[in-house]
């Protein structure tokens, strides 16, 4: 993990210490189940439960002699136990019974953090969309002024996209929250399926229904795909915030601390660095998803090609996604919005945004569609070139535009049915808030 983009609660889950403590928990649970079946003596169970998690340093020391992390862990874990008890640790299990089941638990806990952050971001987006539902601004298509919309509707587009991400993330959590304790090639040859049921049940995991020796890697590909799509949705929001902060636009301003300095050379700079960072991190999430796809196809019942990749992409993607969502929530929570600037930006094209209303009005009055379009287009071209108001350019062509027609709010008259959808989403989201 890159610590710069790791928040403490997520980073704590992916330390070596956390991994080995989870391994100990899996081993203890498996032993409890084995003892309950009469396989492991009660005295051994008591010793195994008392043994502390081994230190990372000791495991690394033993790994240097064994070239096998799991065997080094087992040696370090059992060296404080009586020999008669130590021999029952990992009984009937294979390495990835331990690794994948522990990893499933860590993935589930990590996804709980991601989902909490995603819900928070979606709630704040939705709240601010409702706050600015009637804040008129210009919509842009191809980067060019189109017709007026509202800033609230702009934000609502992103909140709905995030709501879809919540479904994907929840499905992905379900997919990866599984384990397997099924023995060398998943046939339960040396261990009862009841052990697996107990261990996974205690860890809050499902069971891989038809195991090989590992949990199927399409599950992890689904996880990283969901994180990548979520990252792209956050990027879509952040890119909009970046473009709206450009000097010649400046309709919003992202929050900054009092210590903010935008440039080493130009003291006046207010760069959208947080929004830019959110866009950059989305690229990493997409790249990591590609690596997860490569891990799906393993040789026969398993190989180890996936392991090195997962040590990088799983903690990195979860950490980045969590950081990205928390940061995005901070941006929208304290985003400064400038309605006056939005009004000035609408006005700067001298009425061009009303061309569609004039065009449709002429058609409704009996003009041929093509003739009406060409007339209004010619007037609009004059306005583009000379900055004469569109109403004057139209008057010179014999078209009188009623003053009331040139109110930008007219464009928003029929959109309140959209607001009810947003309010319903808001209610759903707040059902997840702990009271």
Image (cartoon, helix red, strand yellow):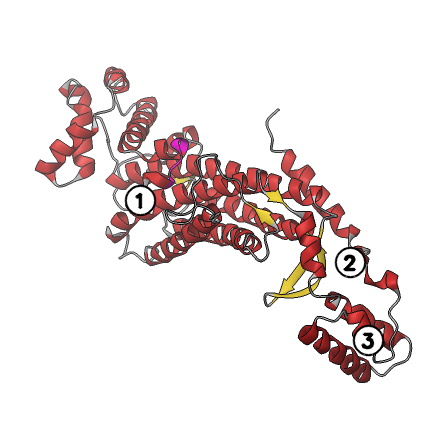
Q: Earlier in the sequence, mark 2 or mark 1?
A: 1
Percent coordinates x, y for residue 25 in the rendering: 32, 27
Identify the residue under disc 3.
Answer: 394
Q: Is residue 41 visible?
A: yes
Corner quadrant of residue 387: bottom right
Q: Earlier in the sequence, mark 3 or mark 1?
A: 1
Identify the residue under disc 2.
Answer: 408
| Label 2 vs label 1, nearer the camera | 2
Query: Relative to 102, is 289 above or below?
Result: below
**Residue toward you, 120 or 248:** 248
| Separation of marks 3 and 1 at Cα, in angstroms | 81 Å
| Separation of marks 2 and 1 at Cα, in angstroms | 69 Å
Tell me the quarter of the image containing the C terminus.
Answer: top right
Most common secondary structure along the magenta stretch: helix
Residue contact at pointers 3 and 2, CB within 8 angstroms = no
Residue contact at pointers 2 and 1, CB within 8 angstroms = no
Give the residue at x 65% y 53%.
Answer: 154
**Residue toward you, 134 or 36:** 134
| Label 3 vs label 2, nearer the camera | 3
Q: Is residue 119 visible?
A: no
Residue count near mark 3 (Cα–Cα under 10 Å), binned few <14, some 14–19, many ≥20: many
Give the residue at x 34% y 22%.
Answer: 36
Query: Relative to 225, is 207 above or below?
Result: above
**Residue toward you, 27 or 133:** 133
Percent coordinates x, y for residue 408 in the rendering: 78, 58
User: What span is colored magenta in the figure?
Assistant: 5-9
Identify the residue under disc 1.
Answer: 187
Q: Earlier in the sequence, mark 3 or mark 2?
A: 3
Percent coordinates x, y for residue 291 in the rendering: 34, 56
Percent coordinates x, y for residue 159 in the rendering: 61, 47
Tell me the quarter of the image containing the N terminus.
Answer: top left
């Amino acid at each position: 993990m890159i610590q710069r983009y790791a928040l403490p609660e997520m980073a704590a889950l992916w330390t070596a210490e956390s991994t080995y403590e989870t391994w100990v928990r899996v081993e203890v649970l498996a032993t409890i189940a084995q003892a309950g079946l009469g396989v492991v003596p009660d005295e051994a169970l008591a010793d195994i439960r008392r043994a502390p998690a081994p230190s990372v340093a000791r495991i690394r020391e033993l790994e240097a002699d064994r070239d096998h992390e799991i065997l080094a862990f087992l040696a370090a874990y059992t060296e404080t136990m009586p020999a008669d008890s130590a021999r029952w640790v990992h009984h009937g299990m294979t390495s990835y019974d331990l690794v994948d089941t522990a990893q499933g638990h860590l993935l589930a806990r990590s996804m709980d953090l991601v989902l909490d952050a995603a819900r928070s971001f979606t709630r704040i987006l939705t709240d601010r969309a409702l706050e600015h539902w009637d804040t008129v601004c210009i919509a842009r298509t191809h980067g060019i002024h189109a017709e007026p919309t509202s800033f609230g509707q702009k934000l609502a587009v992103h909140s709905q996209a995030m709501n879809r991400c919540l479904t994907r993330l929840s499905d992905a959590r379900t997919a990866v929250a599984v384990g397997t304790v099924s023995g060398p090639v998943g046939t339960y040859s040396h261990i009862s399926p009841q052990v697996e049921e107990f261990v996974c049940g205690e860890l809050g995991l499902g069971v891989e229904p038809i195991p090989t020796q590992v949990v199927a890697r399409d599950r992890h590909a689904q996880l990283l795909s969901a994180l990548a799509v979520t990252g792209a949705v956050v990027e879509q929001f952040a890119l909009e915030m970046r473009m709206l902060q450009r000097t010649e636009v400046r309709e919003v301003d992202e929050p900054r601390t009092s210590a903010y300095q935008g440039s080493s050379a130009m003291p006046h700079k207010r760069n959208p660095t947080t929004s830019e960072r959110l866009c950059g991190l989305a690229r990493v999430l997409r790249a990591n998803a590609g690596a997860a796809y490569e891990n799906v196809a393993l040789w026969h019942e398993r190989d180890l090609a996936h392991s090195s990749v997962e040590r990088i992409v799983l903690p990195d993607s979860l950490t980045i996604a969590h950081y990205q969502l928390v940061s995005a929530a901070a941006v929208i929570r304290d985003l400064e919005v400038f309605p006056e600037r939005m009004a000035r930006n609408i006005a700067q094209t001298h009425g061009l945004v009303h061309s569609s209303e004039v065009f449709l009005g002429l058609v409704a009055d009996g003009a041929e569609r093509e003739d009406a379009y060409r007339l209004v287009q010619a007037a609009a071209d004059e306005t583009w070139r000379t900055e004469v108001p569109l109403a004057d350019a139209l008057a010179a062509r014999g078209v009188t535009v009623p003053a009331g027609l040139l109110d930008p709010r007219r464009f928003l008259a029929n959109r309140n049915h959209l607001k009810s959808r947003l309010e319903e989403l808001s209610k759903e989201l707040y059902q997840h808030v702990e009271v």
